[in-house]
Amino acid sequence: MKKALSLWLSIALIAVMIPLSSVHAAKYLPYVTVGELSEGLAWYLEYDESADVESYGFINTAGKVVVPAKYDWVMNFHDGLAPVMLNEKWGMIDKTGKIVIQPSYDSIGEQFVDGLMLVAKGEKWGFINKAGELVIEAKYESASSFGSGIAPVVLDGKPFYIDTTGKQVFEANYDTIYNFLEGFAIYNEGDYWGYIDATGKEIVAPKYDLAYPFQNGLAPVLKGDLWGFIDTTGKEVIKPQYEDVYSFNEGLAAFMKDGLWGFIDKSGKVIVKPKYDEVYFEFNEGLAIVGRYINDEETARGYIDATGKEVTKFAVNFMGGSFENGYAIASDGDDQSYYFLKSPLLAPVSAKPTASKVMVNGKAVSFEAYNIGGNNYFKLRDLALAVNGTDKNFEVSFDKAKNAVNLLANKAYTPVGGELAAGTSQAVKSASPTASTIYVDGAEAPLKAYNIGGNNYFKLRDIAKVFNIGVTWDASTSTIGIDTSLPYTE
């Protein structure tokens, strides 16, 4: 199985990133190497040839240096903090470059989880809090990051899990133990792998030849020579049948059949037929990068969208990174040839004001709504306020750090001001696809949205379907009905 972990992505990006041949006028960044974007910043490398010294810093998507290159090594930002190495010791900086945890550790994790970060003093591991205080003594021979409030550790050769106070929660008498992701951890006994929950209860007996963590509710498992997927109950929802797979992301997973790669959805339905020789990244912001062999030495690479449409020109040796907020790093493969590539999905489209009358539970309500491609798109917060106080109400929030829109069902909406302020202009406007990730009750949802004038507009029927709100259409009066007493129907 190919697992696109962030560290692996960074390494892959350094090694093989090459740009689209169609981007002839791209402005290259004046740095030896540029890494993947994380929270709006990308690390960059400067090399002093005379002193044979490499140093790392961070730039923003405008190419401006935010953190000057002075560190021996850096990792990506998570929740506003990034690990950095200085004089062979690890600490952490914030996004302004301020050192928030002094470089004093011999090794460090990638990010804080459950408020704690894995660190090493010499050969021993412990945990610090965000104040930099060593709250769990560095005494373990081995340890991994927290998840679900517990972390795996080994002390005097004995494996077990501890809570965030350092107290032992339960023993783990397995050959290998791992940290928890999405409430479950993999373990192995002998040659076989299974899963436990955060109480130590066995959820899936060790019966697979290999297993990987859950991601977006499903986990890849290997039985014999074939991969499939299980859900959190252990049910094989997609039977082992593939030669290789990626984890699910944005509702799709790459699979290999007869030596070629395609993509399936969570039901196992083939969305992109297997026709590519390589897949380099999971879907991110609606795009994945794939390649097909030209000959024994050359590979043409490009991006496809979630329908399998090739949305960029395929070029020999091209490679780009994962997109974040509409941008990715790309390069033509030589030093000082990196640039920021804008997502091809962010091309604006025309949005025409909706002329239809809108009734909400029998009452006329004025919305600023637009017709895009034959579908009506409503301002998300307008819809939330319009159904507030009913049994179909929902809350809306935005996580700026993660660029995520969060929707919570059966929760009262909190107005922020400006809702249902219908515009009077009938001018056609430009709408750009929203780069934000959408979550419904904590689960990622493949909802398409457009940004118009700084606000997110969603397809009415998409939101109605999610929250089971009735939608009607009266062609004789050109009236859209929104009825919270009715269930959603197609």
Image (cartoon, rainbow, N blue to C red):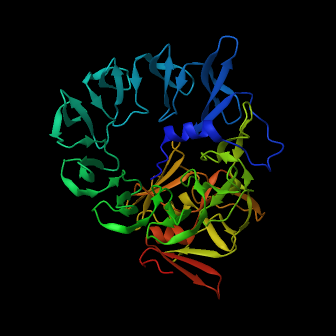
| Residue lying farthest to the right in this orientation | 25
Image quadrant of residue 311?
bottom right
Residue 234, position as x, y percentages in the image: 28, 62
Residue closest to the far bottom? 476
Farthest residue, direction top: 51
Mark yes or no: residue 67 visible: yes
Q: Where does residue 113 sit, x and y in percent of width and height?
A: 36, 36
The mark tally for this picture is: 0
Q: Quadrant of residue 261?
A: bottom right
The one nearer the camera, 134 or 339, is: 339
Residue occupying image coordinates x 75% and y 60%: 429
The one of 423 and 432 positioned closer to us in this rendering: 432
Q: Is residue 391 visible?
A: no
Q: Nearer the viewer, residue 98 or 278?
A: 278
User: Which residue is at a point 50% across and 37% down the rendered structure image?
Assistant: 7
Choose between 66 and 256: the one closer to the eye: 256
Where 14 falls versus 489 (above or below)? above
x and y percentages locating residue 388 in the rendered image: 44, 62
Q: Is residue 71 above or below residue 415?
A: above
Tell me what residue is drawn at x 54 percent, y 46 percent: 403
Task: Residue 448: name its quadrant.
Answer: bottom right
- What x and y, as percent, mark residue 334? 73, 34
Horizontal arrangement in the rendering, residue 97 relative to residue 91 (left or right): right
